[in-house]
Amino acid sequence: MRGWSWLMLVGWLSAVFAPPAFADPLLIEDFTMQPESRWRFFADAVMGGVSTGQMRFETEEGHSHARLTGIVSTANNGGFIQIRRDLETAPPSEATGLRLVVRGNDTRYFVHLRTSGTLLPWQYYQAGFEVTQDWTEVRLAFDSFAPSGGLVRAELRPETITSVGIVAFGRDHEADVSVRALGYY
């Protein structure tokens, strides 16, 4: 009996204290458990551009989030800053799109998905979304993602997704976008 009670206690503690990312198979990220180990910042400077920015992880009113800020410049053939996370597994087969909880400076941002077929740095699938200064849920259907060019399959195959990026892209502007949750729906 004593061994059984111990196993029940361990099971209960595991269920109560399990990080949300493991509790919900549709959740990719909620930024609570060391997100700095999963997310990377990129700018067009790696290709000669002059855009600048940074990624920070913040907590506000008990909610953690990632914040991407900076200046996007199209000078010198540039034009982007982004935060990106590699994905360990493909989306569940029942998933039909991405769900984000975001806010920002009342402008347009993008999600870039890379797949096993996007080998070059400028290859991705892209969908745009608008942010306001209030936290808002955004849903982007997988079939709304467009390829970045002719060397990429015309349609995104969700089972091949390998990374997701939040991107300020394509025009001169000041970027300020925060993401509190990222998952599938």
Image: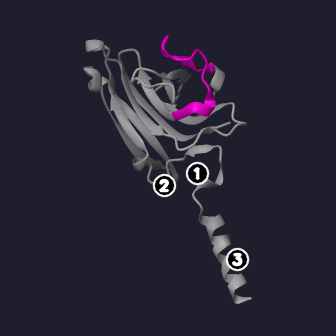
| Structural crowding at the residue carrying mark 1, measured as other residues with C-alpha within 10 Å and reported as few (<14), some (14–19) or many (≥20) | some
- Res. 146 visible in picture: yes
Q: Answer yes or no: do the residues labelled 1 and 2 have beta carbons within 8 Å? A: yes
Three-letter amino acid code of the residue under disc 3? Met
Instruction: Using the image, determine if residue 27 lies above or below residue 173.
Output: below
The number of numbered discs placed on residues in the rendered structure image is: 3
Near-viewer residue (10 or 119): 119
Q: Say what secondary structure mark 2 lies in.
A: loop
Between label 3 and label 2, give the one nearer the viewer. 3
Which portion, as a residue range, is magenta?
144-162
| Structural crowding at the residue carrying mark 3, measured as other residues with C-alpha within 10 Å and reported as few (<14), some (14–19) or many (≥20) | few
From the image, tell me which residue sits under label 1. Answer: 21
From the image, tell me which residue sits under label 3. Answer: 8
Q: Residue 109: give x, y in percent of width and height.
A: 48, 24
Three-letter amino acid code of the residue under disc 1? Ala
Three-letter amino acid code of the residue under disc 2? Met
Q: Say what secondary structure mark 3 lies in.
A: helix
Instruction: Using the image, determine if residue 168 lies above or below residue 39.
Output: above
Q: Residue 28: give x, y in percent of width and height.
A: 57, 43
Q: Say whether disc 1 or disc 2 marks the residue closer to the N-terminus.
A: 1
Q: Say whether disc 3 or disc 2 marks the residue closer to the N-terminus.
A: 3
The N terminus, quarter of image? bottom right
CA separation in Å, label 3 and label 1? 23 Å
From the image, tell me which residue sits under label 2. Answer: 33
